[in-house]
Image (spheres, grey):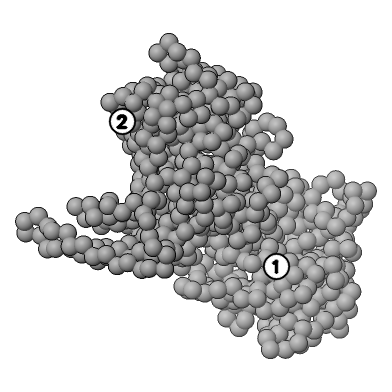
Amino acid sequence: MQSSFIKNITLASSPITMGISIILMSILYPCQGEIAKVKLVSLDTHNISIKDSDQQNTSITVTEWGKAENGQSVNLFTLTNAKGLVAKITNYGAIITELRVPDRRGKLDDVVLGFDTLEAYKQVNRYSYFGAIVGRVANRIANGKFTLDGKEYTLATNAGLHHLHGGKKGFDQVVWQAEPITSPTGATLKLTYLSVDGEEGYPGNLTVTVTYTLTNNNEFKMEMTATTDKPTPVNLTNHSYWNLAGHASGSILGHQLLINADKYTPNNAQKIPTGEIKLVQNTPYDFTQPKLINDGIKQLEGDKPSYDINYALNGKPGQIKLAAKVDERFSGRVMEVYTTKPGMQLYTGYLQNLKTQGKGGVNYQGYAGLCLETQYFPNSVNQPNFPSTILRPGQIYRHTTTHKFYTKQDNLQSILDKNTQVEKIARNFKFTEGPLWHPNGFLLLSDIPANTIYQWQPNQKLQIFRHPSGNANGNTFDLQGHLITAEHSNRRVSRTEKNGKLAALVSHYQGKRLNSPNDLVVKSDGSIYFTDPPYGIKPQQKELGFYGVYRLTSDGKLTLLAKDFVRPNGIAFSPDETKLYVNDSEIGHIRVFDVNSDGLLKNSRIFAQQKYPGKEGVPDGIKVDIKGNVYSTGPGGVWVFSAAGNLLGIIEVPEVPANLAWGDNDYKTLYITARNSLYRIRLKNPGVRPGKSFALRSW
C-alpha cells in the first residue's frame, strides 16, 4: 500500500515545468486499526527526492544526466538505504553506475567499475557492458541463429559470426521507463522496457521489468520479469564489474572466490559451449573451495589469460541458492551472490587499450574487476540438453539475484587501540631499511642506495650516523650493545666497536664470499643469526650457489643452518627463542623452525602465507612482540599473525613497507621503513628488545 502513490509517477515521461518545484503530499488511508502514513515527494527539473516519513534515512534522488541518441531524457537515480549504503542507477541501459558499501571500519567505497558521464558509457558499453542489463538474450548465440517451432531466426551478429548480449543494440543501450519506490524494506527503482517484435531479429513484443532494491539489510536485489506475445528466447543478466577493494584500487587478483558449482560448460575456441557439462574437479575452473583468483588464472593458458566461462550452479533452478562468495582481505568486505538461475558466467576480462577514463579519472587496466553474471547457459537455444530459455505467451520469465554485503572483522583490536593510525615521521629517503631503536632515545635506519645509516630523533634534525655504510641493510645489537650490521655491498656482517671503528665478523663461508647479508637477530647466548640472499650482486659475483640462513657464535664459528630458500630475508625469534621465523620474499611466505638447545634448527614448515596479487610488497622485515605475535611486512602493509599462525589483520601503510623495529622507552611503538619514508604506529604490546638488555652506552 505504501508504494501505490509512487506508482503514479513515471519519471521518464513526466512533463515538469522548468524551474518549478512541486511538493506533493498524499495521505494513504490505512486498513482498519492502522495509523495513516504520509509520503512526501519533492520534484524539480534537476532533482527529485522521495522519502518515507517513517523511513527518513531511506531515500531516492533523481537528477538529469543527459540524452540518448534519439533525444530521450536520461536520469541518474541515487538510492540510499537506512544504513547509509548508496546505489546509483541510470535508466540508460539500467546501468548500475555506483554502489557504495562499508569496509570493516565503516568507510564507504564504490565497489563497481564505471564512468562519470553518460557519454562515456555510450562509448565503452558498445563492447564492455559496464553495469548494464544485457538482453534480450545474454551471452552468446552461435552464428546468430536459432530455430523455434520449426522457424529459423537470424539475429544481429556483433561478436564475429556470433550474437552477443542482445546484439548491436541490446538492452544496455536503450532508455528504460523509471519508477522510484520507497518502502520499509529499502529504496527501490523499477525499470520497464518494451522490446518490439523483430528487434535485433527476435520474435515477439517482450515487456521487460527490472526492479533494483537497496534493502535496509545491506542487500542489493535485482528482480527481472518478462512477458511476450510470441514465443521467444529470454535470458537477462546484469554485467557489473566488481572490485570489493574499491573501483579505483587496481586488481581483483587478490580477491578470494568461491563458486557453488561442481560443473561447468566447456567452450570451443570461439567461446561457444560445446554442449558438454563437465566436472570442475582438477581443472582451473574449480572454485568449490575459496581460493585467490590469481591462483586460478595462473592455471589458465595463453597470454593475459582470463576467465570467461559458465558454471552449472548446484541447487534447483528456480529456487534461490548461493552462486558465489567473494572475500576481499584488506577492506574486510564480503559479497555473497544468490540467484534463482541455473548458471553463472565468471568473467575476469583483461582490460587494455580502454581509451575512456573511469570514475574519478581512474584508468581501468588488466584485471580491474570481475563479473558474476547469473543466467541460463550460453547458447541454450541451440542446445537441447541445456535449460530452456524459451518464453511463451501466458508465461512469466522470472529471475532474482541478490548481492548480500557484510564485513569480516579483523582481530587487530588485541594489539591496536581503535582509530590508531600509521604516522609518517620522515621522508625523502632513497630506500629505507634496517630500523633499530637505541635505548638512548633515537632510531637508526639504513638508506641502502644512499650508502648511509641515519640517526632520527623526535623533534630534531635528521643526522648522518655513518657514511659510507657499506650499503648497510639490517641492524641489531649484540648483548654488549655493539651495533651489528649486515653490509650489502661489502658482503659481510660487521660490528661497531666502542671507538667507532668497524670490525668484520664474517664475510666468507668455507672460503667463498657470502652473497649479500640482509637481516640479522641476536640470541640470548650471544650468537648472531642472519640471512644471505643475493640482492644487489651480479650473477657472476655469486660464489656459493645457494642462499642461506647462518649462525655465527661469539667465538667466530659460522654454521650454515638452511640453504633451501629462494630469497631469505627478515629473521626473528619467538620470545622464548624456541622458534625462529624467516621470511622468503620470493615465495611469499614465512617459514618457522624449531630451535634446538645447541642453536641448530629443525622441523622447517610454513608458518603463514603473505600473498595478495595486485598489491605491491613481499615478506621482508619481521619482528615479534612479547606475547608471541608475529609482525611481517608484506603486500599493502604490516601483516600481523598470532603465535599459532592465524592472521589477526593487516596494518595498512601508504608506501610499500620494508622493515620494522620496536622503539620508544616502552617498546610499544612500531617503526616502519617504507620506500622513501619512515612511519610509526603505537601498539598495545611491547616488542622483544634486540640484544635483550644491555648497559646503555653513548656513541
Name the spot of residue 237 as percent of width and height, x first: 45, 37
Amino acid type of the residue that numbered disc 1 sits on in the rendered structure = Ala
Near-viewer residue (473 or 598): 473
Mark 1 element type? strand
Which quadrant holds residue 554?
Answer: bottom right
* Disc number placed over residue 674 in the picture, else none: 1
- Proximity of marks 2 and 1: CB atoms separated by less than 8 Å: no
Is residue 594 in view?
no
Question: With respect to residue 37, does 303 lie above or below?
Answer: above
Question: With respect to residue 695, does 139 lie above or below?
Answer: above
Report the quarter where the C terminus lies: bottom right
Task: Name the outermost residue toward the left.
Answer: 32
Left or right of 30 on screen, residue 145 = right
Amino acid type of the residue that numbered disc 2 sits on in the rendered structure = Ile
Task: Name the outermost residue toward the right.
Answer: 540
Near-viewer residue (453 or 112): 112
